[in-house]
Amino acid sequence: MRRAIIWDYDGTLGYREGGMWTATALQVLREEDPASDVTADDVRARLQGIFPWERPEVPHPHLSTPEAWWEAQVALLAGVFCAMGYPRARARRMGERVREVYLTPASWRLYPDTLPTLDALRERGWKHYVLSNHLPELREVVARLGLGERLSGLVNSAEIGYEKPHPEAFRRALEMVGPVDALWMVGDNPVADVAGAGAAGIPAILVRTAHEGVRYRCADLTGVPSIVEESAPGGR
């Protein structure tokens, strides 16, 4: 029997210590302008809606190289800093600094239950894949964290130009996995992961997130094995 699990990455298998985009942009702003009174809430409001995964209905295959992807994001970040009143050249420098800080290798971590859960499932015959809305450097991140050797494949929105829950993202994931007897999706987002997988015919487990109306849910990854072993819906 061939069995597989497609995992989300951020918020499911791993996280960035110190915060995500709001925290990073605020850190850079404080470095650049220590006297600024801009708050995290101010930054969060200005960043709202600018990133590709916040517009999953809009494909971006033209941004499927690291250079093109980051150029687009740095330009957006520079625009945010410009709107705060910083001169264009300075705003551009700040946007590039956000990229540098965000990619700091030591900031990327796995949750304590990630490797033990994946290893336990692998011993029971489950293969692991990742489908993530992420940075172009995700493969480097998972390799550095020791996760890469445990994966049979990875589909990343920054490489294919489609963000979950877009149907094309899940089509690519199904193509990656191939025929199986049982298949699950595990993620922390009820829309991108659970609803997106459901639309593609994949049963999904919501983890680390409280949300009503989701059939399969557990507080962390330790609850995943019992669900996939006991529920056993049909495969693809």
Image (cartoon, grey):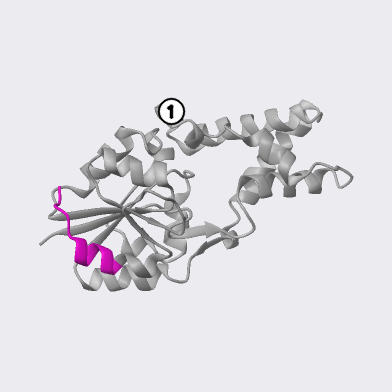
Image point 62% across, 30% down: which residue?
A: 76
Tell me if mark 1 has few (under 14), some (14-19) or many (20+) residues whose alpha carbon lies within 10 angstroms of its own.
Answer: some
Q: Relative to 207, say whether 38 is above or below.
A: above
Left or right: where does residue 28 sit relative to residue 56?
A: right
Left or right: where does residue 4 sit relative to residue 24?
A: left
Q: How many marks?
A: 1
Residue 167 part of the magenta segment: no
Q: Quadrant of residue 89?
A: top right
> Farthest residue toward the left?
1
Element at badge 1? loop
Residue denoted by label 1: 60
> Farthest residue toward the front?
212
Residue 164 in percent (x, y) is at: 39, 39
Relative depth, front residue between 122 and 72: 122
Q: Quadrant of the N terminus?
A: bottom left
Relative depth, front residue between 207 and 37: 207
- The span shown in magenta is 225-236
Relative depth, front residue between 210 and 20: 210
Image point 48% across, 30% down: which residue?
A: 55
Q: Amino acid at mark 1?
A: His
Left or right: where does residue 192 sit relative to residue 89?
A: left
Q: Relative to 230, say whether 209 is above or below.
A: above
Q: Relative to 227, say whether 140 is above or below.
A: above
Left or right: where does residue 158 sit relative to residue 15?
A: left
Residue 168 in percent (x, y) is at: 30, 33
Residue 144 in percent (x, y) is at: 46, 62
Residue 32 in percent (x, y) is at: 81, 44
